[in-house]
Image: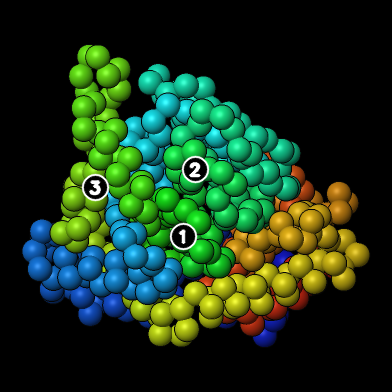
Amino acid sequence: MANTLKIPNDMLPEDGRFGCGPSKIRSEQVATLNAGTTTLLGTSHRQRPVRDLVGSIREGLAEFFHLPDDYEIALGNGGASCFWEIACASLITRQAAFGSYGSFSAKFAKSAAIAPFLEDPVVYEVEPGSYCLPERTEYVDAYCWAHNETSTGVAAPVRRVEGSMEQGALTLIDGTSAAGSLPVDISQTDAYYFSPQKAFGSDGGMWWAILSPAAIERAARLEANVNLPETNRWVPPFLSLSSALDNSRKNQTLNTPAIATLIMMDDQVRWLNDNGGMDWATARCAKSASMLYSWAERSDYAEPFVTDPDARSNAVVTINLDESIPAYQVVSALRDNGIMDTGGYRKLGRNQLRIGVFPSIEPADVLALTGCIDYVVERL
Ligand SMILES: *Cc1c(COP(=O)(O)O)cnc(C)c1O
């Protein structure tokens, strides 16, 4: 750039990573990669050291999420996007109802819509910037929505649709950017799934899912007699939840996982639990988020995108800028100063900033960020 705007060093955050996934990885997590070099990295995932590592993450997550009795933690490769296809293949019997209020919640509904062996989903939809939960619907056997809609910075409640259990329907919640940042009562869900590159500050490529006994039983029943001409249902081995669970119970995965991702995730789960677990992590995210929302409310050129304060996310904060201030210029000036990934979700196409405030991010750095944004905007 011809004339780069230079933010004074003493105003800059210590760490400039504010992305919504991949998100900041703490340097202590990266240091554990060195410690694990000889016994873990480059060794077999079927042998004891890596299996113990997976076991440690599963135990740590059970502690973090206050795992209810009989719930189990499964894992596999492919990210949360893969879990949508797993759910279509192995969890939805005939038809699902969806809450759709942004890119991520819409994508799962779309997968269900194109699965040839499922009936067209019932989709409850609102414009980006708010949320809507699926309502009680006759005949459906799964209710699905996202705890945190990462594309818009909207957080939705996680509680079962009234009457859904009597109906025998499962509740499948995309917790990808919420898990580790927002409080959740796992007993309100049958599958709470996420990827590790958001609050768990690791790399992408895996999915993790907390499964209820009802979800486990549903998958077993659905998969018992598939791939036969008369059942008209195809469950590719890669999308079999039962097989993922069999492997998970042995602290393994169906195919080879990224061991570095596991090492960094294990360190993060320990760090979260050692600091006070879900209560600590969610309070820290709430503190960071409220700094941004209150700064935007005070500002004469910025305002929170999500108008309903109860729907504002404490994991992903979206801030609209006045039309006279092109957000892309602010984002680019910040990036020139080492402050990364503050742009809005591309497909949403708003003049806005989007900032990840996951537990790894220091609240003091969030405060510094607001100062840097003001500094840049005053000089554009
Ligand atoms: C990031 C994200 C996904 C996609 O995760 P991948 O690991 O890239 O598949 C899905 N849902 C939500 C809510 C997300 O934030």
- At x 55% / y 50%, what residue is drawn? 160
Q: Are marks 3 and 2 in contact (CB under 8 Å)?
A: no
Q: Are marks 2 and 1 in contact (CB under 8 Å)?
A: no
Q: CA distance from mark 3 to mark 2?
A: 28 Å
Q: Which residue is mark 2?
A: 166
Question: Which kind of residue does numbered mark 2 sit on?
Answer: Glu
Q: Position of residue 339 (x, y in %)?
A: 61, 67
- At x 57% / y 55%, what residue is drawn? 158
Question: Which kind of residue does numbered mark 3 sit on?
Answer: Ala
Question: Which kind of residue does numbered mark 1 sit on?
Answer: Ser
- Give the number of the mark in front: 3 or 2: 2
Q: CA distance from mark 2 to mark 1?
A: 15 Å
Q: Which residue is mark 1?
A: 187
Q: Which residue is mark 3?
A: 244
Q: Position of residue 3 (x, y in %)?
A: 72, 61
Q: Quadrant of residue 10?
A: bottom right
Q: Secondary structure at mark 3?
A: helix
Q: N-terminal of the two: label 3 or label 1? A: 1
Q: Is residue 342 visible?
A: no
Location of the N terminus (image quadrant): bottom right
Comparing 59 with 254, the one in front is 59
- At x 41% / y 80%, what residue is drawn? 273
**Residue 202 appears left or right of 296:** left
Q: How many neighbours does mark 1 have within 10 angstroms: few (below 14), some (14-19), or many (20 or more)?
A: some
Q: Secondary structure at mark 2?
A: loop
Q: Which mark is residue 81?
A: none
Q: N-terminal of the two: label 3 or label 2? A: 2
